[in-house]
Image (cartoon, helix red, strand yellow):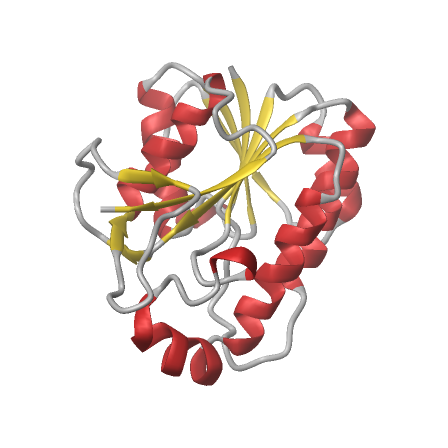
Amino acid sequence: MKLLIIGGTGGTGKHLIKQALEQGHSLTALVRNPAKVKTTHKNLSVIKGNVLDSEKILEVVAGQDAVLSTLGHKRFFIRTNILSEGTKNIIYAMEKQKVNRFICVTSLGINDSRFKLGLYYTLFVIPVITFFYFRDKSKQEKLIRSSNLDWTIVRPGQLTNGKKRGTYKHGSNIGSYIITKTISRADVADFMLSQLNDKTYLHKTSGITY
């Protein structure tokens, strides 16, 4: 397939690029800093751009079979709408260019998965450190849900840098109110790619943890 990857320089995005190339897909990666993409491959095109640039998003979405987003940032203490505004641009471009399949990573702990990241995140991390970040993710999800796209929202638990296992739990009732469940970025990428030809979570959200 022809895939557009948003957020390819992040931890999950790097695994997504690597695994997608191994599966034989043709990739376009939109990144702010192309120098951060260390992978080179005949089927990989790296384009400099910002998700907040609506015209650039329109350009790179054209001709794709699907868009996969691992969009994120580390501005946890700043009131920001980068995720929701960027996703709004992606949705608009996809609907305009008639590209329907959208697979997007958010997180456990928001909207109807609230409290599912365990007590540590519920009582400390989310309200103290990532409050604005998670609020933006919540807006991001609501925009996706109200779109006309064939979307799937992937909600990982606490992300780790572990190796890809290929075995993990996924579904609507994933996570824990007490314990913080984890998942490697490599396995999140594996699950995202598996959804390209799987309609189980079409127009649905799925948590993913070990």
On screen, 184 above or below 5?
A: below
* Residue at horizontal 65 percent and vertical 72 percent from the top: 80
Quadrant of the image occupied by residue 18:
top left
Quadrant of the image occupied by residue 14:
top left
* Residue at horizontal 62 percent and vertical 51 percent from the top: 141
Along the viewing direction, whichever of 52 and 119 lies nearer the viewer: 119
Left or right of 5, for residue 185: left
Q: How many marks?
A: 0
Left or right of 119, for residue 99: right
* Percent of width and height locating residue 119: 32, 75
* Percent of width and height locating residue 93: 76, 36
Residue 85 visible in the current orientation: yes
* Percent of width and height locating residue 100: 68, 25
* Residue at horizontal 68 percent and vertical 52 percent from the top: 142
Q: Going by the picture, which residue comes out furthest to the right? A: 96
Along the viewing direction, whichever of 96 and 167 lies nearer the viewer: 167
Residue 39 visible in the current orientation: no
Quadrant of the image occupied by residue 98:
top right
On screen, 97 above or below 31?
A: above
On screen, 194 above or below 14?
A: above
Left or right of 131, for residue 10: left
* Percent of width and height locating residue 122: 40, 75
* Residue at horizontal 32 percent and vertical 28 percent from the top: 19
